[in-house]
Amino acid sequence: MIPLLSVDVAVIGAGPAGLAAATAARQAGAERVAVFERLGEPGGILPQCIHNGFGLHVFQEELTGPEYAERFVVQAREAGVEFWLNSMVLSLSAERRLSVMSPQGLVHVEAARVVLAMGCRERTGPNILLGGARPAGVFTAGTAQRLVNVEGYLPGREVVIVGSGDIGLIMARRLTLEGARVKAVVELLPYPGGLARNVRQCLEDFGIPLRLAHATLSVEGRRRVSGVVIAPLDETGRPVLSRAEQIPCDTVLLSVGLIPENELSRQAGLELDPRTGGAAVDERGETSIPGIFACGNVLQVHDLVDYVTAEASAVGRWAGSSQASGSRELALVPGGNARYVVPQRLSAGLVPPFTISTRVQRPAGASVVRLGGVVIARRAVVRPAEMIRVDVKPGDWTKVLAEVGSEGCLRLEVEEERP
Protein backbone atom coordinates (compact mmCIF):
# COMPACT_ATOMS: atom_id res chain seq x y z
CA MET A 1 0.00 0.00 0.00
CA ILE A 2 1.34 3.43 -0.95
CA PRO A 3 1.96 5.64 2.13
CA LEU A 4 -0.05 8.85 2.43
CA LEU A 5 1.54 11.98 3.90
CA SER A 6 -0.56 14.99 4.96
CA VAL A 7 1.09 18.40 5.29
CA ASP A 8 -0.01 21.99 5.70
CA VAL A 9 2.39 23.31 3.05
CA ALA A 10 4.25 21.28 0.44
CA VAL A 11 7.12 23.15 -1.21
CA ILE A 12 8.46 21.70 -4.47
CA GLY A 13 12.14 22.57 -4.82
CA ALA A 14 14.83 23.37 -2.25
CA GLY A 15 16.61 26.15 -4.11
CA PRO A 16 16.70 29.71 -2.78
CA ALA A 17 12.97 30.20 -3.49
CA GLY A 18 11.91 26.95 -1.83
CA LEU A 19 14.08 27.50 1.22
CA ALA A 20 12.81 31.03 1.78
CA ALA A 21 9.16 30.12 1.16
CA ALA A 22 9.26 27.11 3.47
CA THR A 23 10.90 29.05 6.28
CA ALA A 24 8.41 31.91 5.95
CA ALA A 25 5.47 29.49 5.90
CA ARG A 26 6.59 27.95 9.19
CA GLN A 27 7.12 31.36 10.73
CA ALA A 28 3.62 32.38 9.58
CA GLY A 29 2.04 29.53 11.51
CA ALA A 30 1.94 26.47 9.26
CA GLU A 31 2.59 23.44 11.47
CA ARG A 32 3.92 20.89 9.01
CA VAL A 33 5.94 22.23 6.07
CA ALA A 34 7.69 19.73 3.82
CA VAL A 35 10.18 20.54 1.05
CA PHE A 36 10.62 18.01 -1.76
CA GLU A 37 13.95 18.19 -3.62
CA ARG A 38 15.12 15.83 -6.35
CA LEU A 39 18.81 16.46 -5.60
CA GLY A 40 20.70 15.03 -2.66
CA GLU A 41 21.32 18.41 -1.03
CA PRO A 42 19.32 21.61 -0.61
CA GLY A 43 20.38 24.88 -2.20
CA GLY A 44 19.44 24.37 -5.85
CA ILE A 45 21.95 25.98 -8.21
CA LEU A 46 23.72 27.94 -5.44
CA PRO A 47 26.28 25.29 -4.34
CA GLN A 48 27.95 25.51 -7.76
CA CYS A 49 27.97 29.34 -7.80
CA ILE A 50 31.25 29.82 -5.93
CA HIS A 51 31.63 33.46 -7.01
CA ASN A 52 30.63 36.27 -4.66
CA GLY A 53 27.94 38.91 -5.11
CA PHE A 54 25.10 37.20 -3.22
CA GLY A 55 23.37 38.61 -0.16
CA LEU A 56 23.97 42.33 -0.58
CA HIS A 57 20.25 43.11 -0.29
CA VAL A 58 19.21 40.40 2.18
CA PHE A 59 22.23 40.33 4.53
CA GLN A 60 23.97 43.61 3.61
CA GLU A 61 27.17 41.67 3.02
CA GLU A 62 28.75 39.90 0.08
CA LEU A 63 28.57 36.10 0.11
CA THR A 64 29.31 33.25 -2.27
CA GLY A 65 26.48 31.05 -3.51
CA PRO A 66 27.23 28.17 -1.10
CA GLU A 67 27.43 30.59 1.84
CA TYR A 68 24.12 32.17 0.88
CA ALA A 69 22.44 28.78 0.56
CA GLU A 70 23.82 27.52 3.85
CA ARG A 71 22.33 30.42 5.77
CA PHE A 72 18.86 29.58 4.51
CA VAL A 73 19.30 25.84 5.02
CA VAL A 74 20.14 26.55 8.66
CA GLN A 75 17.18 28.92 9.00
CA ALA A 76 14.81 26.36 7.48
CA ARG A 77 15.99 23.55 9.73
CA GLU A 78 15.80 25.77 12.82
CA ALA A 79 12.25 26.75 11.83
CA GLY A 80 11.27 23.07 11.73
CA VAL A 81 10.99 22.59 7.98
CA GLU A 82 10.93 18.93 6.95
CA PHE A 83 13.29 18.02 4.07
CA TRP A 84 12.68 15.21 1.60
CA LEU A 85 15.88 14.95 -0.43
CA ASN A 86 16.48 12.69 -3.43
CA SER A 87 12.71 12.95 -3.84
CA MET A 88 11.23 13.59 -7.27
CA VAL A 89 7.69 14.96 -7.54
CA LEU A 90 6.15 12.96 -10.38
CA SER A 91 2.72 14.54 -10.45
CA LEU A 92 0.63 17.36 -9.07
CA SER A 93 -3.15 17.58 -9.25
CA ALA A 94 -5.47 20.57 -8.96
CA GLU A 95 -6.61 19.06 -5.64
CA ARG A 96 -3.05 19.59 -4.30
CA ARG A 97 -2.19 15.92 -4.30
CA LEU A 98 1.41 15.00 -5.12
CA SER A 99 3.04 11.71 -6.09
CA VAL A 100 6.65 11.62 -4.93
CA MET A 101 9.35 9.04 -5.67
CA SER A 102 11.60 9.10 -2.62
CA PRO A 103 14.26 6.90 -1.00
CA GLN A 104 11.36 5.37 0.96
CA GLY A 105 9.60 4.50 -2.29
CA LEU A 106 6.50 6.04 -3.85
CA VAL A 107 4.64 8.38 -1.49
CA HIS A 108 1.37 10.25 -1.99
CA VAL A 109 1.17 13.68 -0.40
CA GLU A 110 -1.96 15.66 0.40
CA ALA A 111 -1.27 19.34 1.05
CA ALA A 112 -3.51 22.14 2.26
CA ARG A 113 -1.32 24.50 0.22
CA VAL A 114 1.41 23.93 -2.36
CA VAL A 115 4.27 26.30 -3.21
CA LEU A 116 5.88 25.81 -6.61
CA ALA A 117 9.60 26.64 -6.47
CA MET A 118 11.08 24.38 -9.17
CA GLY A 119 13.29 27.08 -10.69
CA CYS A 120 14.21 27.06 -14.35
CA ARG A 121 16.39 25.25 -16.87
CA GLU A 122 18.74 26.45 -19.58
CA ARG A 123 17.89 26.69 -23.23
CA THR A 124 19.88 24.31 -25.41
CA GLY A 125 21.07 24.35 -29.01
CA PRO A 126 17.84 22.90 -30.43
CA ASN A 127 15.85 25.54 -28.50
CA ILE A 128 17.56 28.28 -30.53
CA LEU A 129 17.80 26.24 -33.76
CA LEU A 130 21.60 26.28 -33.66
CA GLY A 131 22.96 24.94 -36.94
CA GLY A 132 25.62 22.33 -37.52
CA ALA A 133 26.24 18.85 -36.22
CA ARG A 134 26.31 17.82 -32.57
CA PRO A 135 29.97 17.12 -31.83
CA ALA A 136 31.42 16.73 -28.34
CA GLY A 137 32.28 20.01 -26.67
CA VAL A 138 28.92 21.79 -26.66
CA PHE A 139 27.66 22.58 -23.14
CA THR A 140 25.16 24.87 -21.51
CA ALA A 141 26.90 27.44 -19.34
CA GLY A 142 25.37 26.00 -16.18
CA THR A 143 26.60 22.51 -16.99
CA ALA A 144 30.10 23.86 -17.56
CA GLN A 145 29.86 25.72 -14.26
CA ARG A 146 29.11 22.51 -12.42
CA LEU A 147 31.90 20.65 -14.22
CA VAL A 148 34.46 23.27 -13.20
CA ASN A 149 33.28 24.28 -9.72
CA VAL A 150 31.93 20.98 -8.38
CA GLU A 151 33.40 18.13 -10.43
CA GLY A 152 36.80 19.69 -11.03
CA TYR A 153 36.88 19.26 -14.81
CA LEU A 154 37.87 21.83 -17.42
CA PRO A 155 35.50 21.39 -20.39
CA GLY A 156 37.90 22.86 -22.96
CA ARG A 157 40.85 25.11 -23.75
CA GLU A 158 39.62 27.31 -26.61
CA VAL A 159 36.10 28.52 -25.86
CA VAL A 160 33.38 30.51 -27.60
CA ILE A 161 30.32 31.49 -25.57
CA VAL A 162 27.05 31.88 -27.49
CA GLY A 163 24.75 34.35 -25.74
CA SER A 164 25.58 36.85 -23.02
CA GLY A 165 23.40 35.73 -20.15
CA ASP A 166 24.81 36.15 -16.65
CA ILE A 167 25.93 32.52 -16.24
CA GLY A 168 27.80 32.73 -19.53
CA LEU A 169 29.50 35.98 -18.51
CA ILE A 170 30.51 34.54 -15.15
CA MET A 171 31.86 31.40 -16.84
CA ALA A 172 33.92 33.52 -19.24
CA ARG A 173 35.82 34.83 -16.23
CA ARG A 174 35.92 31.47 -14.46
CA LEU A 175 37.35 29.62 -17.46
CA THR A 176 39.93 32.36 -18.00
CA LEU A 177 41.07 32.05 -14.40
CA GLU A 178 41.41 28.28 -14.90
CA GLY A 179 43.69 28.77 -17.89
CA ALA A 180 41.30 28.45 -20.82
CA ARG A 181 41.13 31.08 -23.55
CA VAL A 182 37.68 32.56 -24.11
CA LYS A 183 37.92 33.84 -27.67
CA ALA A 184 34.56 35.64 -27.86
CA VAL A 185 31.11 36.05 -26.39
CA VAL A 186 28.64 36.24 -29.28
CA GLU A 187 25.28 37.96 -28.68
CA LEU A 188 22.40 38.12 -31.15
CA LEU A 189 20.93 41.31 -29.68
CA PRO A 190 22.52 44.77 -29.92
CA TYR A 191 22.91 44.87 -26.13
CA PRO A 192 24.17 42.37 -23.51
CA GLY A 193 21.80 39.84 -21.99
CA GLY A 194 23.44 39.97 -18.56
CA LEU A 195 23.93 42.56 -15.86
CA ALA A 196 26.16 45.53 -16.61
CA ARG A 197 28.40 44.69 -13.65
CA ASN A 198 29.02 41.21 -15.06
CA VAL A 199 29.91 42.62 -18.48
CA ARG A 200 32.42 44.91 -16.81
CA GLN A 201 33.89 42.49 -14.26
CA CYS A 202 33.83 39.28 -16.32
CA LEU A 203 34.57 40.47 -19.87
CA GLU A 204 36.08 43.96 -19.95
CA ASP A 205 38.41 43.35 -17.00
CA PHE A 206 39.80 40.28 -18.78
CA GLY A 207 39.90 41.64 -22.31
CA ILE A 208 37.31 39.15 -23.63
CA PRO A 209 35.59 40.38 -26.84
CA LEU A 210 31.81 40.85 -26.79
CA ARG A 211 30.39 40.60 -30.31
CA LEU A 212 26.97 42.25 -30.18
CA ALA A 213 24.39 41.97 -32.99
CA HIS A 214 26.04 38.80 -34.28
CA ALA A 215 24.35 35.53 -35.17
CA THR A 216 25.96 32.15 -34.55
CA LEU A 217 25.25 30.32 -37.79
CA SER A 218 26.66 26.90 -37.02
CA VAL A 219 28.90 24.77 -34.86
CA GLU A 220 31.58 22.98 -36.88
CA GLY A 221 33.27 19.68 -36.20
CA ARG A 222 32.52 15.98 -36.40
CA ARG A 223 33.67 14.14 -33.29
CA ARG A 224 34.80 17.30 -31.43
CA VAL A 225 34.00 20.98 -31.91
CA SER A 226 36.47 22.62 -34.26
CA GLY A 227 34.93 26.08 -34.50
CA VAL A 228 31.85 28.23 -34.89
CA VAL A 229 30.71 30.39 -37.77
CA ILE A 230 29.28 33.81 -36.89
CA ALA A 231 28.04 36.77 -38.93
CA PRO A 232 26.97 40.34 -38.12
CA LEU A 233 23.32 41.33 -38.48
CA ASP A 234 22.09 44.05 -40.82
CA GLU A 235 19.52 46.69 -39.90
CA THR A 236 16.68 44.22 -40.56
CA GLY A 237 18.16 41.63 -38.20
CA ARG A 238 19.36 39.26 -40.91
CA PRO A 239 22.90 37.80 -40.97
CA VAL A 240 25.26 39.36 -43.49
CA LEU A 241 26.63 36.12 -44.95
CA SER A 242 29.28 37.88 -46.99
CA ARG A 243 30.90 38.95 -43.70
CA ALA A 244 30.65 35.56 -41.99
CA GLU A 245 33.75 34.40 -40.12
CA GLN A 246 34.93 31.24 -38.44
CA ILE A 247 36.31 31.26 -34.92
CA PRO A 248 38.39 28.13 -34.23
CA CYS A 249 37.65 26.57 -30.83
CA ASP A 250 37.25 23.20 -29.14
CA THR A 251 34.37 24.14 -26.83
CA VAL A 252 31.08 26.05 -27.13
CA LEU A 253 29.05 27.22 -24.15
CA LEU A 254 25.41 28.21 -24.58
CA SER A 255 24.10 31.07 -22.44
CA VAL A 256 20.93 31.81 -24.36
CA GLY A 257 18.22 32.16 -21.76
CA LEU A 258 16.27 30.24 -19.15
CA ILE A 259 12.93 28.44 -19.23
CA PRO A 260 10.74 28.13 -16.10
CA GLU A 261 10.24 24.48 -15.07
CA ASN A 262 6.48 24.40 -15.41
CA GLU A 263 5.74 20.79 -16.35
CA LEU A 264 4.00 20.21 -13.01
CA SER A 265 2.16 23.52 -13.38
CA ARG A 266 0.75 22.43 -16.73
CA GLN A 267 -0.12 19.04 -15.31
CA ALA A 268 -2.17 20.67 -12.56
CA GLY A 269 -3.94 22.88 -15.12
CA LEU A 270 -2.61 26.25 -13.97
CA GLU A 271 -3.03 29.32 -16.14
CA LEU A 272 0.38 30.29 -17.54
CA ASP A 273 1.50 33.70 -18.77
CA PRO A 274 3.07 33.35 -22.24
CA ARG A 275 5.20 36.44 -21.60
CA THR A 276 6.98 35.03 -18.54
CA GLY A 277 6.58 31.31 -19.15
CA GLY A 278 5.44 31.05 -15.53
CA ALA A 279 2.10 30.90 -13.76
CA ALA A 280 -0.29 33.85 -13.68
CA VAL A 281 -0.61 34.93 -10.04
CA ASP A 282 -2.13 37.53 -7.77
CA GLU A 283 -0.21 39.77 -5.36
CA ARG A 284 0.14 36.87 -2.90
CA GLY A 285 1.68 34.59 -5.50
CA GLU A 286 -1.47 32.44 -5.63
CA THR A 287 -2.12 30.89 -9.03
CA SER A 288 -5.39 30.35 -10.86
CA ILE A 289 -5.99 27.27 -8.67
CA PRO A 290 -6.71 28.23 -5.05
CA GLY A 291 -4.13 26.91 -2.62
CA ILE A 292 -1.32 26.59 -5.17
CA PHE A 293 1.33 29.33 -5.08
CA ALA A 294 4.40 30.05 -7.19
CA CYS A 295 7.61 32.00 -6.57
CA GLY A 296 11.18 32.38 -7.74
CA ASN A 297 12.45 31.49 -11.18
CA VAL A 298 9.55 29.15 -11.89
CA LEU A 299 7.34 32.25 -11.77
CA GLN A 300 9.64 34.71 -13.55
CA VAL A 301 13.35 34.63 -14.30
CA HIS A 302 15.17 36.88 -11.80
CA ASP A 303 18.50 38.63 -12.14
CA LEU A 304 19.44 38.57 -8.43
CA VAL A 305 18.96 35.73 -5.97
CA ASP A 306 18.21 38.31 -3.27
CA TYR A 307 15.07 39.22 -5.21
CA VAL A 308 14.14 35.54 -5.39
CA THR A 309 14.40 35.37 -1.61
CA ALA A 310 12.30 38.50 -1.07
CA GLU A 311 9.57 37.28 -3.41
CA ALA A 312 9.53 33.74 -2.01
CA SER A 313 9.45 34.93 1.61
CA ALA A 314 6.36 37.01 0.88
CA VAL A 315 4.66 34.11 -0.91
CA GLY A 316 5.60 31.71 1.89
CA ARG A 317 4.01 33.98 4.47
CA TRP A 318 0.75 33.99 2.52
CA ALA A 319 0.83 30.22 2.03
CA GLY A 320 1.59 29.66 5.70
CA SER A 321 -1.11 31.97 7.00
CA SER A 322 -3.80 30.90 4.49
CA GLN A 323 -5.44 34.33 4.46
CA ALA A 324 -8.04 35.03 1.83
CA SER A 325 -7.59 37.71 -0.81
CA GLY A 326 -10.07 40.46 -1.66
CA SER A 327 -13.22 39.61 -3.58
CA ARG A 328 -12.75 41.99 -6.50
CA GLU A 329 -9.81 41.38 -8.79
CA LEU A 330 -8.13 43.84 -11.12
CA ALA A 331 -6.32 42.54 -14.18
CA LEU A 332 -2.78 43.85 -14.57
CA VAL A 333 -1.31 44.05 -18.09
CA PRO A 334 1.98 45.42 -19.48
CA GLY A 335 2.20 48.42 -21.75
CA GLY A 336 4.74 50.79 -23.26
CA ASN A 337 8.27 49.43 -22.86
CA ALA A 338 7.20 46.87 -20.24
CA ARG A 339 7.62 43.32 -21.53
CA TYR A 340 5.56 41.65 -18.83
CA VAL A 341 4.24 42.29 -15.34
CA VAL A 342 4.00 40.13 -12.21
CA PRO A 343 1.53 39.77 -10.57
CA GLN A 344 -1.01 39.51 -13.37
CA ARG A 345 -3.94 40.40 -11.13
CA LEU A 346 -4.46 42.41 -7.96
CA SER A 347 -7.11 42.41 -5.26
CA ALA A 348 -8.84 45.78 -5.10
CA GLY A 349 -9.01 45.57 -1.32
CA LEU A 350 -5.36 44.76 -0.69
CA VAL A 351 -3.35 46.85 1.74
CA PRO A 352 -0.03 48.29 0.46
CA PRO A 353 2.85 48.05 0.26
CA PHE A 354 3.03 45.26 -2.29
CA THR A 355 5.59 44.57 -4.98
CA ILE A 356 5.23 44.68 -8.75
CA SER A 357 7.96 43.28 -11.03
CA THR A 358 8.63 43.89 -14.71
CA ARG A 359 11.36 43.99 -17.35
CA VAL A 360 11.67 46.30 -20.30
CA GLN A 361 11.75 45.25 -23.94
CA ARG A 362 14.61 47.56 -24.91
CA PRO A 363 17.23 49.69 -23.13
CA ALA A 364 16.31 53.29 -22.38
CA GLY A 365 17.48 56.28 -20.38
CA ALA A 366 15.63 57.96 -17.54
CA SER A 367 12.16 56.35 -17.38
CA VAL A 368 8.98 56.47 -15.35
CA VAL A 369 6.94 53.50 -14.17
CA ARG A 370 3.19 54.10 -14.26
CA LEU A 371 0.41 51.99 -12.80
CA GLY A 372 -3.01 52.91 -14.09
CA GLY A 373 -1.55 56.21 -15.29
CA VAL A 374 -0.10 57.07 -11.87
CA VAL A 375 3.70 57.42 -11.62
CA ILE A 376 4.84 54.95 -8.95
CA ALA A 377 8.62 54.96 -9.61
CA ARG A 378 11.43 56.46 -11.65
CA ARG A 379 14.61 54.84 -12.92
CA ALA A 380 17.76 56.59 -14.16
CA VAL A 381 18.26 53.85 -16.76
CA VAL A 382 16.40 50.66 -17.70
CA ARG A 383 17.85 47.52 -19.30
CA PRO A 384 16.20 44.23 -20.36
CA ALA A 385 18.65 42.26 -18.22
CA GLU A 386 17.69 44.07 -15.02
CA MET A 387 14.40 43.41 -13.28
CA ILE A 388 12.42 46.44 -12.12
CA ARG A 389 10.81 45.89 -8.71
CA VAL A 390 8.53 48.56 -7.30
CA ASP A 391 6.98 48.57 -3.84
CA VAL A 392 3.64 50.32 -4.36
CA LYS A 393 3.02 52.79 -1.53
CA PRO A 394 -0.37 53.43 0.15
CA GLY A 395 -0.70 56.97 -1.24
CA ASP A 396 0.02 55.85 -4.80
CA TRP A 397 -2.37 52.91 -4.50
CA THR A 398 -5.18 55.24 -3.43
CA LYS A 399 -4.58 57.33 -6.55
CA VAL A 400 -4.48 54.22 -8.75
CA LEU A 401 -7.81 52.93 -7.42
CA ALA A 402 -9.37 56.30 -8.18
CA GLU A 403 -8.36 55.85 -11.83
CA VAL A 404 -9.72 52.29 -12.24
CA GLY A 405 -12.44 52.13 -14.86
CA SER A 406 -15.43 49.85 -15.05
CA GLU A 407 -13.41 47.24 -16.98
CA GLY A 408 -11.32 46.53 -13.87
CA CYS A 409 -8.01 46.53 -15.72
CA LEU A 410 -4.76 48.29 -14.83
CA ARG A 411 -1.85 48.92 -17.17
CA LEU A 412 1.74 48.85 -15.94
CA GLU A 413 3.84 51.02 -18.27
CA VAL A 414 7.52 51.90 -18.45
CA GLU A 415 8.20 54.96 -20.60
CA GLU A 416 11.29 57.02 -21.23
CA GLU A 417 11.04 60.54 -19.89
CA ARG A 418 11.28 63.20 -22.54
CA PRO A 419 13.29 66.38 -21.91
Image (cartoon, rainbow, N blue to C red):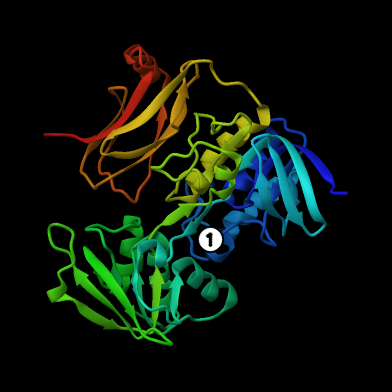
Amino acid of disc 1: Thr
- Residue 3 in percent (x, y) is at 85, 47
Residue 183 in view in this figure: no
Residue 120 in view in this figure: yes
Query: Closest to the observer: 195 or 241?
Result: 241
Query: Closest to the observer: 357 or 188?
Result: 188
The crowd level at tag 1 (other Cα within 10 Å; few <14, some 14-19, many 20+) is some
| Count of numbered circles on the image | 1
In the drawing, does residue 337 fall left or right of residue 391? left
- Residue 286 in percent (x, y) is at 56, 32
In the drawing, does residue 318 fall left or right of residue 390? right
In the drawing, does residue 274 fall left or right of residue 96? left
- Residue 209 in percent (x, y) is at 26, 72
Quadrant assignment, res 211: bottom left
User: Vertical placement of 149 versus 273: above or below?
Assistant: below
In the drawing, does residue 314 fall left or right of residue 360? right
- Residue 340 in percent (x, y) is at 36, 39
Helix, strand or loop status at disc 1? loop
Say which residue label 1 marks.
64
Residue at screen point 50% across, 19% down:
350
Residue at screen point 73% across, 48% down:
99
Residue at screen point 51% across, 69% down:
143
Q: Quarter holding the C terminus? A: top left
Query: Closest to the observer: 239 or 328?
Result: 239
View extreme (right): residue: 1
